[in-house]
Image (cartoon, rainbow, N blue to C red):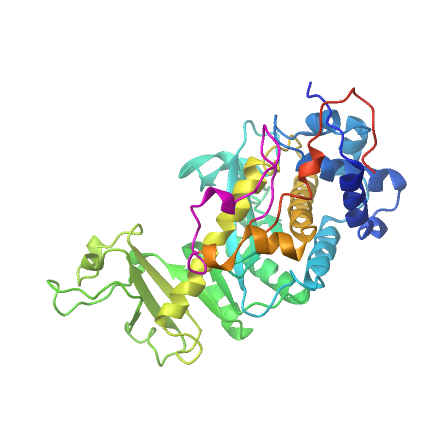
Amino acid sequence: MATPRKPTASTAEAVDRFCGDFDDLFCRVAERTALRHYLIGLLLPRERNKTLTELAALVPGADRQRLHHFLHDAPWDPDALGARRVDLWCRHPELGPHGNGVLIIDETGDRKRGHGIVLAAQQYIGKLGRTANGVVAVTSHWADGTRHVPLGVRPYRPASRLPAGKADPAFATKPELAWELIEQARAGGVPFRAVVADCVYGENPTLEGRLRAARIRYVLALRPRHGTWQVVADPAHPPAFTPAELELGPCYGPTRGTRLIAATADPTVLTADSTVLTADSTWFMATSLSVAEADAAEVYRIYRLRDWIEHYYKPVKHELGWADFQVRSEQAIVRHWQLVMLAFTFSLLTASPSDHAQETPREDRGAAGEKSTAPHRLAGHTATGPRLAVPLGASAAVPAPLVDRPTPTGTGSPA
């Protein structure tokens, strides 16, 4: 069993103050206490999987049965918790959103054993690059190239687990779930310049039509084999590496409603022969942004902001225990995901402006939207052993005091 680690008084107070903004969403004191215990358990350094059993063992004063009831049966709404969290972020004077950020839509999957979990089925798991038994979620995220915040999550219900398959009223495709998340972000007052997403969503005409009807700007990826390629007049002298504005048939063009932008790491592949195009070297993006709003290079920069969601998946999966749940019901799984997003947002909002300036100096950043390879750009950590989970752009100074010397089981109180 894991040895409990005692949170310091200052950190316990920070968690308690933060959770105070959500207390009215829980009707009982026991549930408010469980919220604090669960949050602290997720923030503690990873030593084992962050299951209910481990969280109860890690956090002094926590009880496994009470945490189980909190996650499974207690009467609280995970969507209401998420909406309050996003509203709290929107009202932050320094870290709140602005209109130059983007709304990222993506999906993430994690492998799971057995079929007891209602959301688990044989389906494509992105991080594995193949089909496996697992659970998939569609997520929405806000990023501006300096900081990023999770917005919402929707579980994907595999048709094979539903009584009527794809005809079941509970079934929704990933683009349909994406539209729910886009509407949720707009209803929450989150400003963004454009929606960005990969080809799963870019090649869905229904989603694109909804975005256009709602006058929401977008930059969506298309696969090279989706009938898009650039004709190069002289294959021996291909264009230099710059995002190029393409005109293709009656659909795409700089003066039409949808523009097509191509970018490549290897100009030699942009030939009239579409068979040589590969997803590893060439990107195609459809956008409703006009030429006046963004030239080809700017469209490419906006799409590259999508890379920042990887800065989210890494800490929440490696440190906060996104996929560590050992619960079976959809409600319990979604509640766990919402609590992980709450822990992530806590780390961001509790860092002072000076911490952000120190952690992400302007002169040390790469091009906007590009991933950084510098190790210190991820979570800083002042303690030895497993690393704390801290959002990119935030300081580890606040959650770091959670790491203390081992104390006897049952001593101390987190809140």
Residue 298: quarter of image: bottom left
Q: Residue at x 64, y 51 (%)?
A: 348
Image quarter of the N terminus? top right
Is residue 360 toward the left or the right of residue 220 in the image? right
Name the one closer to the observer, 188 or 1: 1
Residue 188: quarter of image: bottom right
Residue 309 percent coordinates (x, y): 51, 51
Residue 65 percent coordinates (x, y): 80, 27
- Residue 379 on the magenta segment: yes
Examine the rendering and report whether any part of residue 201 can be seen.
Answer: no
Is residue 117 toward the left or the right of residue 409 in the image? left
Residue 6 percent coordinates (x, y): 76, 29
- Residue 105 on the magenta segment: no
Is residue 109 toward the left or the right of residue 404 in the image? left
Examine the rendering and report whether any part of residue 175 can be seen.
Answer: yes
Name the one closer to the observer, 232 or 296: 296
Q: Which residues are magenta?
A: 366-391
Magenta region, mostly helix, strand or loop?
A: loop
Residue 169 lies, with reference to residue 125, above or below; the image says below
Q: Residue at x 83, y 24 (%)?
A: 411
Q: Residue at x 75, y 54 (%)?
A: 80
Name the one closer to the observer, 276 or 23: 23
Residue 363 percent coordinates (x, y): 47, 58
Residue 182 lies, with reference to residue 56, above or below; the image says below
Image quarter of the C terminus? top right
